[in-house]
Amino acid sequence: MTRLDAYGHLAADPVLARLIGEVGEPDPFAWFSPERFGPTNFSGMVLHIVSQQISTAVAFTFFDRIKAATGGFPTPEGILAMGAGALRACGLSGAKTTYLLDLARRQLDGLIDLEDMASQDDAEVVRTLTQVRGVGLWTAQNFLIAQLHRPDVLPAGDQGIRRAVERAWQLEGLPSIAEVQARALPWAPYRTYAAALLWRFFYGA
């Protein structure tokens, strides 16, 4: 599988072909620097949770505060050692503080193993991750893309994706999640690339 294969497949859709002509062929696995997520999947998941429902810039600020408090990229031990008060002092809400503590406890207790998911299929990864408090489908799908580099993941509930579809197909209103999923069926097995294309189209480079 190559990016050429992926975008060649997606170009069979005339609207996606037009978008490729307008914005190019973005690499879905290079949107965020690996140095930003850190060296472990656990650290990456911490950033995904921190990023929920806030801007990327604010999420990076909060994440950098956690790194400063723990002396490096977050580990389960470091998160638990911080405790709720120190996490809240980094700017996190009470809910996200609870989510990170639950994530750390599950990782340390062996209830999940974020570092050993390569052999699991996408559905199994989603089932495992969504057992963690505060981790829903959107967060799990972004983990699949950013940490596991899975090629066929479309976060159809993402507002940027839905608005990109609305704009690109000149729809009269915001499409439902089910409508986006149905439209995307022919894009398999490269829906991650379609997501990157739609994000680039909607948000710009």
Image (cartoon, helix red, strand yellow):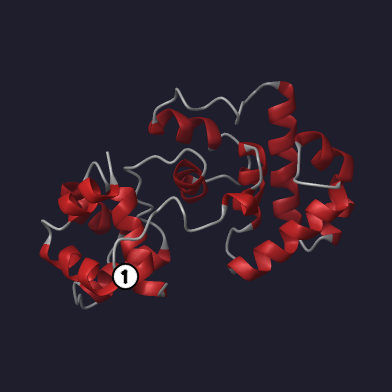
Q: Nearer the viewer, residue 145 or 103?
A: 145
Can you see residue 91?
yes
Count of all numbered marks drawn on residues in the image: 1
At 59% across and 69% down in the image, what residue appears?
55
Image quarter of residue 59: bottom right
At 35% across and 55% down in the image, what residue appears?
156
Q: In the shown orientation, is residue 103 left or right of residue 5?
A: right
Q: Nearer the viewer, residue 95 or 73?
A: 73
Q: Nearer the viewer, residue 110 or 99?
A: 110
At 60% across and 29% down in the image, what residue appears?
115
Q: Amino acid at mark 1?
A: Ala
Please tell me whether residue 82 is drawn above or below residue 108 in the rendered image. below
At 30% across and 61% down in the image, what residue appears?
25
Image quarter of residue 133: top right
Q: Nearer the viewer, residue 120 or 157?
A: 120
Quadrant housing the N terminus: top left
Q: Residue 143: horizontal and vertical position, in percent? A: 51, 44
For disc 1, the marked residue is 164
Is label 1 in a helix, a strand or a loop?
A: helix
Q: Residue 205: horizontal and vertical position, in percent? A: 42, 72
Q: Residue 112: horizontal and vertical position, in percent? A: 62, 26
Q: In the shown orientation, is residue 51 left or right of residue 27?
A: right
Q: Residue 151: horizontal and vertical position, in percent? A: 34, 42
